[in-house]
Image (cartoon, rainbow, N blue to C red):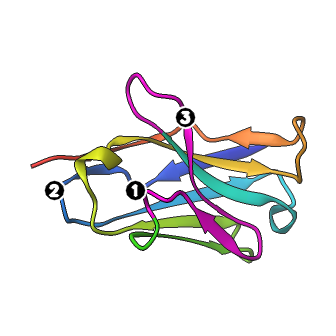
Amino acid sequence: QVQLVESGGGLVQPGGSLRLACAASGILFSAYAMAWYRQAPGKQRELVARIISGSDYADSVKGRFTISRDNAKNMVYLQMDSLKPEDTAVYYCNARLGVSAQYNYWGQGTQVTVSS
């Protein structure tokens, strides 16, 4: 059974930082591209950052967010700095094997709220 469990969300003031973590089980973790998506109220889910060997980011978070992975621990992280109110969303961990639609898994999401 595949599980992706996010943690680390919460309420933070603008300019603050949070670190999200995602623990994966039930997959050959090193073979999967890992990603963070987010969905704000009334908006579509969007890709925030993705990592396989290298990483890429949405333009809106470049220079502020850093994605990393630990293949020995089956963990992926998202360090979020200089947070803005527009970063408020539910953040989801995603694991995908290549471009497969079958081997594409999601966590339950963790709420991030940036507000003073």
Are the residues tagged 1 and 3 within 8 Å (C-beta)?
no
Q: Is residue 48 above or below residue 40?
A: below
Residue plotted at (27% across, 67% down): 82
Residue plotted at (34% across, 49% down): 87
Q: Is residue 71 above or below residue 41?
A: below
Quadrant of the snapshot with the N terminus: top right
Q: In the orientation shown, which residue stands out farthest toward the top? A: 42
Earlier residue among tags 1 and 2: 1
Q: Could you classify mark 1 by the number of other residues whose Cα lies within 10 Å: few (under 14), some (14-19), or many (20 or more)? A: some
Q: Residue 3 colored magenta? A: no
- Mark 3 lies on residue: 45
Q: Please, what is the three-letter code of the amino acid marked with disc 1?
A: Gly
Please tell me which residue lies in front, 108 or 100: 100
Earlier residue among tags 3 and 2: 2
Q: Please, what is the three-letter code of the amino acid marked with disc 2?
A: Gln
Of circles 1 and 2, which is in front?
2
Q: Is residue 41 above or below residue 57?
A: above
Of circles 3 and 2, which is in front?
3
Earlier residue among tags 1 and 3: 1
Residue plotted at (77% across, 60% down): 33
Classify mark 1: helix, strand or loop. Answer: loop
Task: Locate residue 64, reporting x and y percent.
Answer: 38, 70
Q: CA distance from mark 3 to mark 2?
A: 23 Å
Task: Locate residue 69, reporting x and y percent.
Answer: 64, 72
Please tell me which residue lies in front, 44 or 51: 44
Looking at the image, residue 59 sits to the left or right of residue 19; the answer is right
Residue 1: tell me if it is visible: no
Q: In the orientation shown, which residue stands out farthest toward the front? A: 59
Point out which mark residue 13 bears.
Answer: 2
Task: Locate residue 46, reporting x and y percent.
Answer: 55, 41
Q: Which residues are magenta?
A: 39-61
Task: Locate residue 102, reporting x and y percent.
Answer: 90, 35
